[in-house]
Amino acid sequence: MANFETPALREYPIIPLIHAGTMAHSKPFVAKAEYQQPLGFPGALVDNWESVAVKKLGELVEESRALRVFLDSCVKCGACTDKCHYYLGTSDPKNMPVARQDLLRSVYRRYYTLAGKFFPKLVGARDMTKDVLDEWYSYFHQCSQCRRCSVFCPYGIDTAEVSMAARDIMDTVGVGQKYSNEIIAKVHKIGNNLGLPEPALRNTLDGLEEDVKDETGVDVKFPLDEKGAEVLLITPSADFFAEPHIDGLIGYAKVFHQAGIRWTLSSHASEAANFSMFIGNHDNLHKVAIRIREAALDLGVKRIVVGECGHAWRVAYSFWNTLIGPFDFLDRNYPVPQHICEMTYDLIQRGALTLDRSANDGKIVTYHDSCNVARASRMGSMPGGQFVIPRAVIKASVNKFHDMEPGSIHESTFCCGGGGGLLTDDLMELRVKGAQPRMQALQHVVENHGVNYMAAICAICKTQFAKVLPYYQFPMDMIGSVHGLVSKAIQLGTKE
Amino acid sequence: MSALTIIYAVLFYAATVVLVGGVAYKVYVYASTPAPLKIPTTPAPTTRLGVVGRMLREVTVFESLFKSNKWIWLFGILFHFALLLVLLQHLRYFTQPVWGWVVLEQPFGIYAGFIMVAGLFGLWARRFLVDRVRYISNLSDHLMLALLVAIAVSGLTMKFVAHTNIIALKQFFLGLLAFQLQPLPADPILLIHLALVATLMIIFPMSKLLHAPGVFFSPTRNQVDNPREHRHVAGWSASINNPGGR
Ligand code: HEM
Ligand code: SF4
Ligand code: SF4
């Protein structure tokens, strides 16, 4: 399939010995000027970029307590060294979280600490050189910002914050990543990651209405830009036509239909994803997010519900109120924003949905906790609700469910290997190798419990798994949406 | 007064100023640097009180470290708790009369020195034996452990091998506290011990030892998980002004 070897799946997880430089060649395509400029970044490496980079680093540290504390506090205890899926899958020591942080910390020390200014060798401080920049470009694009390291660090040092800062600095000097920046440019211009304009979107939704009608005989609506609807649904654009995402979208529509909730999508805000988080740039973060506030106000909705997307849920849950609040114009009897799983779960609790588990009887299901949902947000009112609620929705829709090993679920979940702006073909080797720890845990439940279906609530996870499962000899359609299961189980015409 | 006494008096005043001033400055910087977004590592407590509990667990039983690595946790706990006991035991050299609970703590404090050394050697061994930890260790990480071991060993030597004039030493430190110079015993091991301790005090605020104040300011650990209920703004996010609404 490609010129690299897919890592072996073993009986028990083994921490690999380090092999320096195994992934030094891994680099995503660099963004051309046309994708840099719409984001407010220079089109190519600027003159005296060294001092621009160092200055930007200083500014970022000054405006982020997290960065400041993280750069100062690491004691090199090593507790995080075996926690990153990219290290486990590649054995490249620079993929150990602390080593990844050190790529930037070494520069910070050199220019902003006494010890680094006077005794650089002693504390591992380095000048900002082209080699360092190249190394940043390679290894800060081998971090999916999944925050697994932050769970296990005694000070909660979050390498995701460090790699966001590094990417922001690289963009500032004119070296951006093509995949993320091209997508953000599309959102600015057209409104979604896929560059799908309003007429095409309407077409797609009409097509879905027909498909569901053919299949079930019921008129399930997929409304677009419907003023006065109660709920605005913000969902990743992959839900509009990628497989298996689309089954999820159909599931949401059926739930709204049976519960009798008037809902709408928006052509102005037809995208939940906000890749600006991946590049750590808050101007773009705000600019992409504000469309949602505008759409909600324009359509006069009372609630905002967010579809199945991991990082989008982080942005929505943790950042929206800060970025695009206050939400005083919405109905505060519901959480703002609300996750589609929270909504479905509440409806199930209230007996508003008829679900027939046996409709999914061919499936033995496991659930992949997506990083950003597991470690950077919540559902429901209890800490850990993000683990309970999606599983409760699944268990209401299927008869057979088995969790993967405890060390690979909940807050210890392994990233799919494609998060954080790495879901691009030019990083295929990294994506396959980074998926190894998750595939290993999956293998276990496949062998021991006959699991044949893995449900997830993240557009990136779904796309990534559909692509990498075959490398590990699993069928690609083994991955599916949680609401795809709901869609199968729901008995239309029984409540409405 | 001997030159030695004067040199050590100046050294300890300077070290104290650097330690206290440096840490106070760092704490001020941490406290005044904004945390513009909510980034607690979840699941996180949803109340302030819950966060206080999480932080207490982090600094007393090293909760996260326990989850990640039992060896580092074991050696880390041994070292830090022994260090704490030793520090408390040292209060007797700075108080007159010695506080009652410090007297009671004496027997523990004395033997804690051995445990501290054991913990430090455990941590140090990892830096050689575990290839991942060897890879991330800088010279400064080794020197820091060497310094602490040297402090502990020189201290234990005075306690169990070559006794020093502890009465005179106490006079010296009580004198420093009262800004009156008292002669310092010219015992080589004591002089080494004191010089190393002063070195530790001086490098504290400019080294990784900042993890001690730092942990309390770590946003992933000290933030309340309530972004939907309370609009959090700080720094750049405080200047966001969204039009519309009611
Ligand atoms: C709030 C107080 C403190 C907390 C919560 C704390 C916590 C920790 C933790 C969790 C580690 C990582 C595990 C380990 O390597 O032991 C560590 C490492 C370390 N701590 Fe502390 N610490 C505190 C105060 C101090 C102080 C006052 C010192 C002073 C000398 C110190 C010296 C060290 C050293 C040298 C290491 C690195 C050990 C190594 O090289 O492996 N700590 N600390
Ligand atoms: S666990 Fe935290 S303190 Fe320890 S080496 Fe990793 S980042 Fe540094
Ligand atoms: S955030 Fe995730 S991908 Fe990045 S270093 Fe930490 S564990 Fe690895």
Image: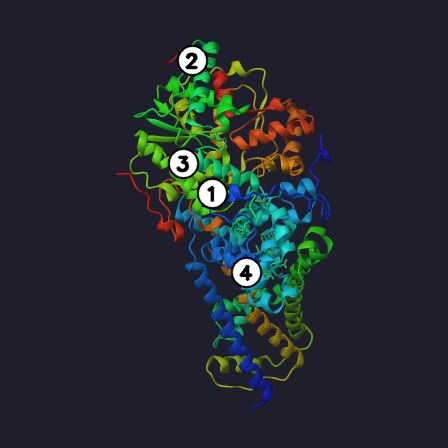
Q: Nearer the viewer, residue A262 or A126?
A: A126
Q: Which mark is residue A492?
A: 2
Disc 1 marks which amino acid? Pro
Residue corresponding to mark 4 = A51
Q: Which mark is residue A8?
A: none
- C-alpha gap between disc 2 and disc 1: 45 Å
Do residues under tags 2 and 1 come within 8 Å of each other at their CB atoms?
Answer: no
Q: Is mark 4 within 8 Å of ligand 3?
A: no
- Foreground disc of the pair 4, 1: 1
- The local crowd at label 4, few if under 14, some if 14 to 19, many if 20 or more residues have their Cα within 10 Å, is few
Do residues under tags 3 and 2 come within 8 Å of each other at their CB atoms?
Answer: no
Q: Residue at x 60, y 86 (%)?
A: B4
Co-location on one chain, circles 4 and 1: yes
Q: Is residue B164 left or right of residue A242?
A: right
- C-alpha gap between disc 3 and disc 4: 47 Å
- Foreground disc of the pair 3, 1: 1
Colouring scheme, one of rainbow, by chain, secondary structure, one colour: rainbow
Instruction: Give the mark, 3 or 4, whose residue is nearer the N terminus.
Output: 4
Instruction: Give the mark, 4 or 2, whose residue is nearer the N terminus.
Output: 4
- The local crowd at label 1, few if under 14, some if 14 to 19, many if 20 or more residues have their Cα within 10 Å, is some
User: Quadrant of residue A270 in the image?
Assistant: top left
Determine whether the residue tagged by mark 4 lies in a helix, strand or loop: helix
Q: Nearer the viewer, residue A165 or B226?
A: A165
- Foreground disc of the pair 3, 4: 4
Q: Is residue B13 left or right of residue A13?
A: left
Co-location on one chain, circles 4 and 2: yes
